Amino acid sequence: MAATASISSPCALFSYQGFRGALISTRTFQTTESQRQCGRAVAAPISAKFDLKPPPYPLDALEPHMSQDTISYHWGKHHRGYVENLNMQIVGTDLDGMSLEDIIILSYNKGDILPAFNNAAQIWNHDFFWESMVPNGGGKPSGDLLELIERDFGSFERFSAKFRSAACTQFGSGWVWLAYKANRLNVGNAINPHPSDEDKKLVVVKSPNAVNPLVWDYLPLLTIDVWEHAYDLDFQSRRADYVSMFMEKLVSWETVSARLEMAKAQVAEREREEEKRKYEEDNESSSNETVEMYLDGETEDSEAE
Amino acid sequence: MAFRPLLTRKTLACAAGLGSNGGIATSFRGLQTFTLPDLPYDYGALQPAISGEIMQLHHQKHHQAYVTNYNKALEQLHDAISKGDAPAVVKLQSAIKFNGGGHVNHSIFWKNLAPIQEGGGEPPKGSLGWAIDNDFGSLDALVQKMNAEGAALQGSGWVWLSVDKELKKLVVETTSNQDPLVTKGPSLVPLIGIDVWEHAYYLQYKNVRPDYLKNIWKVINWKYASEVYEKECP
């Protein structure tokens, strides 16, 4: 399947960019050039910048649960619109040439949202959404993912209830996520000053309109789109039925598990880099002192010694 | 608790003069709850600008859900207040704002629309017509402005033509989700509200919100807007 294939493709290494790098290996940021390298069949490029990535299945593959009609408008019009609009917006600006995720973080601007944010984040969100689903999906997760779910929510059923409830109480447009949170407090994206392994956990979070957990420095694992355009044609006002259908018939737990493994790896990598940085900082200051003492050989300090 | 269905029409008959609150019922504890107001026209009467299918769903499902959930939240709030349960009172605020706002906004919306045979789309005359020309240059300019802001609104919300009752000026405003107009200014009185939530147009216009906005003016009820305006600016 395209989703798993792209994780290990050369494109992953090509687009690696530190903490968020591995996560964006399945994302849209690829120049036309790199797409040729990857040899992937994609929709004809709309511009030289971001491309509209197709879902990893034909548009009718999620029938009868999510209709082809819905997907052809949702992907073909809404998602395409975000791509086209972002490409127009960033031409000739500082954002031109940046990765999608960098554009998202920059334009989120700590909550004081800049114009490019809505389009950029919605591109990312929709890519992530299509890949969160699979024909004949649903059921239960297994392995590490199930263990963590049971640890952090009590049981899979309780997680499922929490996720559904969040999806039904996100008032207005938005998204609901299962995310992996590491070394972050629950408010804003403040860094936890006393991190521990217990702080690394799964959380269910809601976000309005285009916002996603990347801006809080969480690692998203699963999402459901609760903008009305996601379910109006198939379910009209019955959002609860849409959410049930998504959980029971469409979720790709395989993809979610793979994302969890990547997330854990990234968190470990970041911790290693953080330790290395601290170690270098400590060594730097001690070597500075040595130099000073050497230069001040004739002062009281050396005599006291 | 909800003794609504059979009483709806009766309650409405009594509540005819109650303005934008729709029907009001009083539970045995003296708490005023609300009922879904009737439409003054058939579901299909606004076609082709707005389809009968949308009107029916919008009224019977979406607006009804706001009413139901608003009443539920009010009951819980009433309970929490009488128990002095401050955290519970605070926790209920978002449900009240969202569902109460939804009921308020949609009650106004149904009055903002009228079939063409009943004056829908007829430009405003009298003092409102003058005020529009004064404050925006022309009715066309006002429509362009509201359409532009309605189309640009990210996510869900409303675009409003309102009158500032202190300054006696017309103001175009937008609110997000179901925030009622008053959240943008205590002296703003809504004259026309256009629902730009996707449920208001998606089944008919899909993602092309600008087409919905262009067409809805054919069934806008300027008579009602003028009445409200003349009351605030006699």
Image (cartoon, coloured by chain):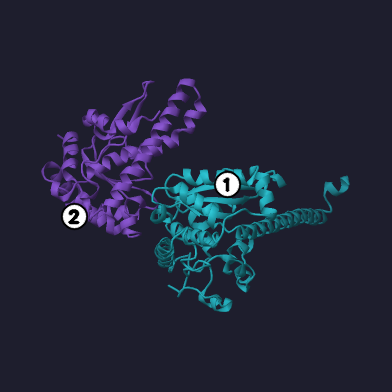
Dot 2 falls on a residue whose secondary structure is helix
Disc 1 residue type (three-letter): Ser
**Secondary element at image label 1:** helix
Chain designation of label 1: A
**Is residue A95 toward the left or the right of residue A144 in the image?**
left
Are tags 1 and 2 found on a single chain? Answer: no
The residue drawn where x is 41% and y is 55% is A234
Image quadrant occupied by the C terminus of chain B? top left
Whether residue A175 can be seen here: no
Separation of residues labelled 1 and 2 (CA atoms): 51 Å
Q: Nearer the viewer, residue A122 or B31?
A: B31
Q: Is residue B225 above or below residue A49?
A: above
Towards the viewer: A213 or B109: B109
The chain under label 2 reads B
Q: Residue furthest left?
A: B126
Q: Which mark is residue A275?
A: none
| Chain A drawing hue | cyan
The tint of chain B in the picture is purple
- Callout 2 crowding tier (Cα within 10 Å): few <14, some 14–19, many ≥20: few
Residue B151 in picture, x, y percent from top left: 32, 55
Where residue A160 is drawn, which disc sits there?
1
Q: What x and y, as percent, mark residue B115?
A: 18, 48
Residue B209 drawn above or below residue A15 = above
Mark 1 in CB contact with mark 2 (< 8 angstroms): no
The disc at residue B140 is 2
Q: Is residue B137 left or right of residue A11?
A: left
